[in-house]
Image (cartoon, rainbow, N blue to C red):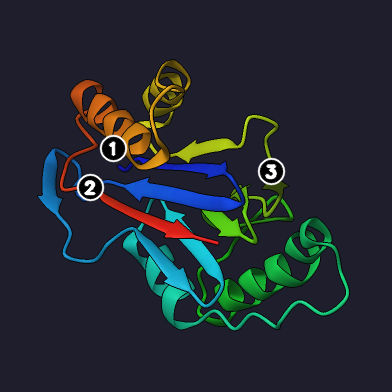
Amino acid sequence: MTCIIGLAEDNKVYMGGDSALASGWTVRITAQPKVYHIGPFLIGAEGSPRLDQILQYHLDIPEQVLEEDYEYMVTVFIEAVRAAFKGVGFSKIEDNEESGGIFLVGYQGHLYKVWSDFQIGSYADSIAACGCGEEFALGAMKALEHLPPRERILKSLEIAAYFSGGVMPPFVIEEGI
């Protein structure tokens, strides 16, 4: 249970996340933020805390050399993620399809969404979200377009928490280039 929301604006990426850690009907506040920096990347993940642990402590991403940013993300970056997941036994293979986790990535002023099948999405409106509060946060982000990025993300997280029992403060908001 989570809500991660990101916005790319003026060549910067802003990302916010909640602090809910749910198991069945029990919801606790996590001590580890769900939004964090890994080198030049700003990452926010939903789902199992193990996903965050792997991304933070097992991910080894080669530097970008010649590729365009999007090409780099869908080739070099995502292959590093797949290798990290496989290396610690996090990837699942069912019906001959590999899957991992869902998370947002800010890189070089662009916002990307990584899906569980390792596809990378980039959206024309420069907004993305994941977690059980995703739809509420996306609607709020659209309605609050007039606000500055940090305030817009904070209000969107508050609205997602109002409607979803799996989203709760405190909220962490980070900025990346």
Is 169 on the left-hand or right-hand side of 74? left
39 is higher (above) or lower (below) than 67: below
**Label 2 amino acid?**
Phe
**Label 3 amino acid?**
Gly
Instruction: Name the image quarter holding the N terminus.
Output: top left
Mark sitting on residue 71: none
Can the viewer see residue 103?
A: no
Q: Helix, strand or loop at disc 1? A: helix
Q: Quadrant of residue 76?
A: bottom right
Structural distance between the alpha carbons of marks 3 and 2: 24 Å
Task: Report the mark closest to the observer, 3 or 2.
Answer: 2
Q: Residues within 10 Å of mark 2 (few under 14, many from 20)?
A: many
Can the viewer see residue 148?
A: yes
Q: Nearer the viewer, residue 29 or 69?
A: 69
Task: Report the mark closest to the observer, 3 or 1.
Answer: 1
Return the residue at label 1.
154
Return the residue at label 3.
121
Q: Earlier in the sequence, mark 3 or mark 2?
A: 3
Return the residue at label 2.
171
Q: Nearer the viewer, residue 78 or 93?
A: 78
